[in-house]
Image: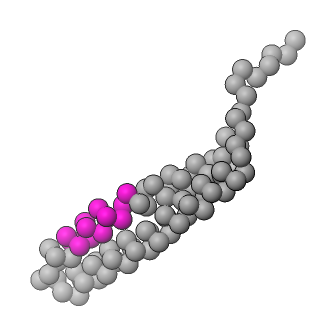
Amino acid sequence: MSHPDPSPRPQYSAGGTAALLIIGLLFLIPSGLCTGIFGGGALLDAFVNPQNASDSLSMIFAAALFGGPFIAVGGVMVWIAVKRLRGR
């Protein structure tokens, strides 16, 4: 005697999953590039001008503070979309 699956998998719409993936990538890619460029520029400035390292460190923290939440939201949206596509 076979037992039915107690928790059937929910069906997600393809359009909703595609929208989640596209919007997530629109958050993730520009935010990651911008944060990386500002953080990398500040890090490069810290190595070139060690006397201004505290200013560079504050710029890195500011880039992470303003860009980090958008990177996190975009990453979570992409992760959920990929999870939906795989059917988990």
- Judged left or right of residue 17, residue 2 is right
Q: Report the magenta residues as a range.
A: 57-69
As drawn, the residue found furthest toward the right would be 1
Above-or-below relation of 87 to 73: above
**Is residue 46 left or right of 6 when viewed as pictured?**
left
**Is residue 73 part of the magenta span, yes or no?**
no
Placement of 24 over or under 31, stated as above or below: above
Vertical arrangement, residue 51 with respect to residue 7, above or below: below
Which residue extends farthest left?
A: 51
Q: Is residue 35 left or right of residue 11?
A: left
Q: Residue at x 62, y 51 (%)?
A: 81
Asked where in the image residue 78 lies, by quadrant, the reply is: bottom right
Count of marks, rendered view: 0
Majority SS type along the magenta span? helix
Residue 82 visible, this angle: no
Colouring rule applied to residues: one colour
Please state if 68 lies on the left or on the right of 47 as rendered: right
Which residue corresponds to the image point at 12% horizontal and 83% vertical from the top-left?
51
Q: Splitting the image into 4 quarters, where does residue 41 fall? A: bottom left
Q: Please say whether residue 67 is visible from this viewpoint.
A: yes
As rendered, which of 75 and 22 lies closer to the eye? 22
The image shows residue 24 at horizontal and vertical percentages of 54, 59
Q: Position of residue 23 (x, y in %)?
A: 56, 61
On the rendered image, what quadrant is the N terminus found in? top right
Residue 3, given in percent of the width and then of the height, sits at 80, 16
Q: For the C terminus, which image quadrant?
A: top right
Which residue occupies 66% across, 57% down? 18
Name the residue located 36 percent from the left edge and 65 percent from the top edge. 67
In the displayed image of the protein, which residue is found farthest to the top? Answer: 1
